[in-house]
Image (cartoon, grey):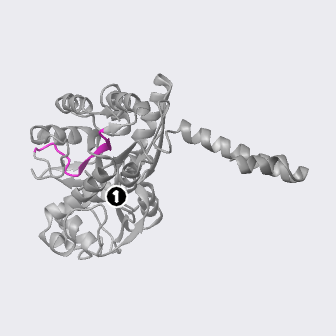
Amino acid sequence: MTSFLTKLRGGSVSRRLALAGMAGFMVLGAVLLFQTGCGSGGGSAKELVAGGSTFVDPMMREWARIYDKEKGVKVDYKGGGSGKGIEQMTEGTYAFGCTDAPMNEKELEAAKKKNGAVIHIPLVIGSIAPAYNLKEIREPIKFTGPVLADIYLGKITKWNDKALTELNKGLDLPDKTIKVVRRSEPSGTTFAWTSFLGGNSEDWKAKVGPPAKEVKWPVGGGAKGTDGVANEVTATDGAIGYIEVLYALNKNIQFGSVRNPAGKDIKADDLEGMTAAADAMLKDIPDDLTFSLINAPGEKSYPICAVTWAVFYEKQPASRKDTLVDLMRWVTHDGQKEAPPLHYAMLPKGLVDRIDKKLDLVKAE
């Protein structure tokens, strides 16, 4: 630095001005580095940076709006898919990531090496709808797990296939090619969808494998994010895709019912169906609060429900810890009443009590 200041005092006026500008930039950079905790990322006491699940994006944005108004803390939620949420949380870019699939052993191990143990906090329950574009059909089409699996395996390729017409007696299904749409990036919605397909089809498990955020699809074209799939279905005659039900309702996209294990045909916008699925599984939720609502028992349960978790490190920067914990408590308590208007289901009280105990484990570095 001494030699730099020596150069600054000497030389032409233009050179001195240029060097002075460089000195100012260096000082500003040092100040910013100090203010942000040496690049820890993820936000501060007045702003939390997060992202991930597009399934929960509408809910997160509504929570962020209300929380900022009530608490004066901004939540900058960036979406991008569950895979990105996990990745950026692990790297420390996000204070928390949102994912519709629990972190797997490989992801947890990578996070542990980076900054220690990770906590999963359930935020809300939603449903995934089989959405389609058949304007000539007015009534909702009925689907079953085996039929949807065969569509995504490429075994059922026409809307008037016998498997569909037998399910939908009275509907004049067209002789039209089914155009399969699915996610193109790692996605928690894909994890839930493939969990459902695999749970209803041995052929799916044999040919595609276990549930995952990203799989080798036998057929179809990819679109990025839930919004991308919704837009592709809207634009493509004969298309079928899987989307969070709010996107279908907001974009006026057709979606059908799905037969549950009790043999009842339930639609994805049935809030009672989501709540019933959660209540049925409550007693089986393990200590880490990761669980599946796919094919939940009960006559009223919708069979393709998904949970969104916030994932974050148990050890948090002291400047951020209280803000992050307060947001999680607010979302899982007061914030729950905002869920039904957006067609998400509230968390069962028994689960919320366990979330409170889990949040007590968060500590400052």
Magenta range: 298-314
Report the amino acid beneath label 1: Ser
> Whole-percent x and y of residue 41?
47, 44
The spot of residue 256 in percent (x, y) is 29, 55
Name the element at disc 1: loop
- At horizontal 31% and vertical 65% (from top left) the residue drawn is 214
Query: Quick one: which residue is furthest to the right in this view?
Result: 13
Could you tell me which residue is drawn at 20 percent across and 47 percent down?
A: 302
Q: Badge 1: how crowded within 10 Å, few (<14), some, or many (20+)?
A: many
Above or below for 201 versus 123: below
Snapshot quadrant of residue 165 = bottom left
Quadrant assignment, res 258: bottom left
Q: Quadrant of residue 136?
A: bottom left
- Classify 125 as above or below 104: above
Q: Name the spot of residue 300 as percent of width and height, x first.
A: 15, 42
Query: On screen, 58 above or below 87?
Result: above
Residue pointed to by mark 1: 187
Does 360 sit left or right of 178 as displayed?
Answer: left
